[in-house]
Amino acid sequence: MSKRYRHYRVASRHHACMMSPFHQYMHEIQKQPILLLGIIFLLFMFFIKCITCHR
């Protein structure tokens, strides 16, 4: 009884993790690494824009 309950709790916690947008996003990145490169590129461009504006 208690073992089944514990398994259920772990499974539900894992399900909650799976449902989180961040986890879904990480999963997408693992399938398509090019997404990560795109994000880094966008952040880099934004960073450069900030530096050039604030000078």
Image (cartoon, rainbow, N blue to C red):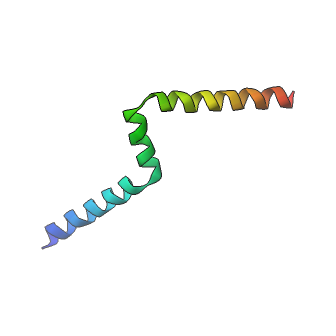
- Residue located 36% across and 53% down the image: 18
Residue at left 50%, top 31%?
Answer: 36
The answer to whether 50 appears left or right of 32 in the picture is: right
Give the side of residue 33 with respect to residue 5, left or right. right
Counting from the top left corner in percent of width and height, residue 47 is at 71, 30
Spot occupied by residue 37 in the image (x, y as percentages of width and height): 52, 27
Q: How many marks?
A: 0
Indicate left or right for 33 with 52 as reference: left
The image quarter containing residue 7 is bottom left
Residue 48 lies in what quarter of the image?
A: top right
- Point out the image quarter for the N terminus: bottom left
User: Residue 16 at x, y = what percent?
Assistant: 37, 60
Judged from this view, the residue extending furthest toward the right is 55
Up the image or down, 11 lies above or below 37; here it is below
Q: Is residue 6 above or below residue 23?
A: below
How far from the left and from the top, in percent, is residue 32?
41, 31
